[in-house]
Amino acid sequence: MTVTAVAPARRARLDLSWPVLIGFALILCALIVLPMSWLVYFSVTDKGHFTLANFVKLATDPTFIDPLVTTVILATSSAVICCAVAAPMGWLIARTDMPLRRTIRALVTASFVTPPFLGAIAWELLAAPNSGLLNQAWRALLRDPQAEPLFDIYTLPGLIFVVSCYTFPYVFVLVANALDRIPGDLEDASSILGGRTWTTARRVTIPLALPALLAGALVAFLQAMTLFGSPAILAIPAGFHTMTTKIWSLFQYPPKLELAAAASLPLLVLTVLLLRAEHMILGRRSYALVGGRQSDPRLVRLGAWKWAALGFAFLVLLNPVFLPYGALLNAAFSRVATQIVSFGNFTLRNIEFVFFELSATKLAVRNTLILGVSSATVGTLIAVVISYVTARKAIAGWRALAFLATAPIAVPGIVLGVGLFLSYTRPPFVLYGTLWILLVAFVTIALPAAYQQLQAAFRSVSVDLEEASRILGATRLQALAHITAPLLRTSVIATWCFIFVGVIRELSAAIILFTSETKVISVLIFDLNESGDLGAIAVLGLIMLVITFAVVIAINRIPGFGAIRLRNA
C-alpha cells in the first residue's frame, strides 16, 4: 500500500500589510506636507490673490528688519560663546583625569533637559535689575540700596547669556563624543615620534574633533535662532523682538496671517540650509580613522591643575543649573519670590495656590498628561512602522518616506505652529480649539528624532527571523508585531519616553495653537509670567522638572542610551 503525503490546505489570508503601510505614508504626508503647503500659499497671497507684497514688507519695514538683525546677533553670539565654553569642557571630560567627570556629564544633562523658557524665568528671579536676588546681594554688599544693578537680564546681552546657558550642551555633547571616539593609538604614535602635548593636540586631536565643533556651532546657532520662550520672556519686556517673537506678535489681535506665513518662510529656509551644512560637516572625510580595534583614549594628567579644571566646570554649571534651580526652589517656598527664604517668610502658600486655587492647573496638567501619553504612543507607532518600511525597503518610495520622516527637524516649532494653524482652522479639517491640533504638532516635532533612533535599531536586527516568519505564512505586519518589535523593546520604550519628555516641555508650537480649553503646563507658566505670579511659576516649573528628570533617569537606565537629545522650546 502506498501512502501519499498530502500537504494541509492553507486557508486564504487577507494580507492588510500594504494598505496599512500606505496609510501610514499618507499620515506622514498629512503631518508635514499639508501645513507647509498652506504656509507657502498664505505667504504669497492677499485675500486669495497672488502677491509678493508680504515679502516686500518684510524686506523694507524696520519693524521686521530689526528683529531679523537681532536674531542674527543673538544666534551668532550664542554659537561663539557655546563653542568657547563647551569645547574646553568637552576636552576636560573626555581627555583628562579631572575628578567627578561622570558627575559633570550628569549635570550637563540637567541643563540639557531644562526648558529654556523656565531657565529664562529663573534668571528673571536672579538678575532683574531692581528685584533680582543677585542685584539685591550686590547692593547689600555695597551697603547702598540705590546702587546701579550688577546685572540687567532685560537686555540683548542678558538674552544672549541665558540662551547660551541652555544651548552649550548641544556643542558639549558633540565635542565630548567626538573626543571619546578618538583612539589613544594616534596620540601615542605622535608622542613616540617626538610630538609634545600641544603638538599632538594641534596635529592630531583638534583636526579629528574640529568637524564636531563646527557642527556644534551650527546647532547652537540654529537653536538660538529658533527659540521662542526665552526671547518672549526677556526680550519683549525690554522692548525688542526676535523673529520668533515677531511671528507670535502677528497672531495677536488683529491677526496678520499672511505676514506671519511670509515671516516664517525665511526662518524655515535658513534652518534647512544650516542643517544641510551640519550634515556636510559631519560627513566630511578629510580626516578618517583607519584600522581595526582601537585603544581607549589616552587621558592627560593634569596634576594639581585638575582641581582648577573642576572649579571651571562647576563655575560653568553654576549658570544653567545651580543658580536657576536654587532661585526656583527659593521662589516656591518664599512669601515673596525675590526674597531669600527664611524662617520668617517660609510658606507653603504657593503650593496650596497652584493645586487648590488656580483653576487652570488641573486642566493644564490633565491636557499635558493626555497629550504626553497619546503623542508618545502615536508618535512611537508611526516611527516604528516608517522605520521598518525604510530599513527593510518594504515599499516603493521608501526613500521619500525617509525624507518626510526627517523633514520636520528643519521646521522650527513656531513655524510649524503657524502652518498647522493655517491648515486646521478651515474645512474640511477644523481642529483648532481641540487637543487634536496639539497632538498633530507634538507628534510632528518629535517624529525625526524618534525615527532616527528606531531606524538605527532596525538596522541592527537581522532580517533572517522576519524572512523565516514570512516563509511560514506571516504577513509583514505580523512579522513586525511578533518578531521584530519584541527584539527592539528597549528602543521602543526609550523612544516613547523621549517623546513624552518633549511634550512636557514644548512651548513654541503650543503658544500658537492653544485655546483657553487646551492649555498645557508650558503655556500656563508663560501666562503666569505675564501676570508676574513667580511663586506659582516656580512650583509648576519644579513639577515639570521632576517629571522630566524621572523620565530621563528611566531612559538612561536602558542599556545603550545616554543623555537624550531634546528639542528646545
Image (cartoon, grey):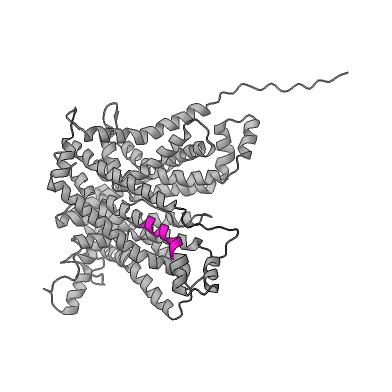
Query: Predominant secondary structure in magenta?
Result: helix
In this view, the residue farthest toward the right is 1
296 vs 333, left or right, is right
Residue lying at 32% horizontally and 43% vertically, measured from the top left: 411
217 vs 98, left or right, is left
User: Relative to the observer, which residue lies in front, 429 or 295?
Assistant: 295
* Relative image position of residue 228 (x, y in whole percent): 26, 50
Q: Is residue 282 magenta?
A: no
* Relative image position of residue 566 (x, y in whole percent): 38, 52
User: Relative to the observer, which residue lies in front, 179 or 97?
Assistant: 179
Q: Can residue 383 be seen in this view?
A: yes
Residue lying at 26% horizontally and 52% vertically, measured from the top left: 229
In this view, the residue farthest toward the front is 193
6 vs 124, left or right, is right
Q: Please state, as top left, top right, bottom left or bottom right, where the N terminus lies in the image.
A: top right
Q: So how many labels did they put on this image? A: 0
* Relative image position of residue 468 (x, y in whole percent): 65, 35
Provide the residue span drawn in magenta: 206-216
Q: In the image, is residue 363 above or below residue 213?
A: above
